[in-house]
């Protein structure tokens, strides 16, 4: 039964994600007390996504680290530079907003990437 529910949710994920973001923005004051749960939810998503990784895939990743280094370069260099550019474009006088934008761009990238890869049966 849980597998069936999960499959149905996975099919609707492209719609559920933006709807959830909109609901979160509209109900931010009501959901504020749940903020402490966010790191635990991301940790659970990461753990549950990575539990299925087999030793053969880990060995393959170690033997061919190019995609990992490319991903790290994108997450740690390209994304912050993109955020910095967007921040200076729209908030050039507010340095704290620019820093917040950079943090918002880079923190969830790894976890969300792993989540989408596992949903669509990619190579974690």
Image (cartoon, helix red, strand yellow):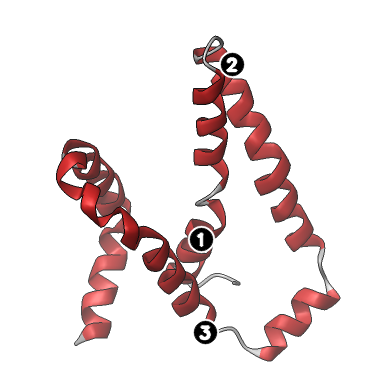
In the picture, the disc for residue 88 is 2
Q: Earlier in the sequence, mark 3 or mark 1?
A: 3
Neighbour tally class for label 3: few under 14, some 14-19, many 20 plus, Cα within 10 Å: few
Image position, residue 103 (x, y; %): 55, 40
For this orientation, the residue located farthest to the right is 63
Q: Secondary structure at mark 1?
A: helix
Residues tagged 3 and 1 counted as in contact (Cβ below 8 A): no
Residue shown at 23%/44% (left/top)?
24
Residue shown at 23%/84% (left/top)?
2
Marks 3 and 1 sit apart, C-alpha to C-alpha, by 14 Å
Q: Earlier in the sequence, mark 1 or mark 2?
A: 2
Does residue 18 sit above or below 33 in this rendering? above
Occupied quadrant, residue 61? bottom right
Q: Specify the quadrant that holds the C terminus.
A: bottom right
Occupied quadrant, residue 122? bottom right
Q: Could you say which is closer to the camera, residue 119 or residue 84? A: 84
In the picture, the disc for residue 51 is 3
In the picture, the disc for residue 111 is 1
Q: Earlier in the sequence, mark 2 or mark 3?
A: 3
Residue shown at 49%/77% (left/top)?
47
Marks 1 and 2 sit apart, C-alpha to C-alpha, by 26 Å
Does residue 48 sit above or below 73 in this rendering? below
Does residue 5 sit above or below 42 in this rendering? below
Neighbour tally class for label 1: few under 14, some 14-19, many 20 plus, Cα within 10 Å: some
> Going by the image, does 3 lie left or right of 102?
left
Q: Secondary structure at mark 2?
A: helix
From the image, state whether disc 2 or disc 3 is nearer to you: 2
Neighbour tally class for label 2: few under 14, some 14-19, many 20 plus, Cα within 10 Å: some
Image position, residue 57 (x, y; %): 69, 82
Q: Could you say which is closer to the camera, residue 112 or residue 8? A: 112
Q: Secondary structure at mark 3?
A: loop
Image position, residue 62 (x, y; %): 81, 76
């Amino acid at each position: 039964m849980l597998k069936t529910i999960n499959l149905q949710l996975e099919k609707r994920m492209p719609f559920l994600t933006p709807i959830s973001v909109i609901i979160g923005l509209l109900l931010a004051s009501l959901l504020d007390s749940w903020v402490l749960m966010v790191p635990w939810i991301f940790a659970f998503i990461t753990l549950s996504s990575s539990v299925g990784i087999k030793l053969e895939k880990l060995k393959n990743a170690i033997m061919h680290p190019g995609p990992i280094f490319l991903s790290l370069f994108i997450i740690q260099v390209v994304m912050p530079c993109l955020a910095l550019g967007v921040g200076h474009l729209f908030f050039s006088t507010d340095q704290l907003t620019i820093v917040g934008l950079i943090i918002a761009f880079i923190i969830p990238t790894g976890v969300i990437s792993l989540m989408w890869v596992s949903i669509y049966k990619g190579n974690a």
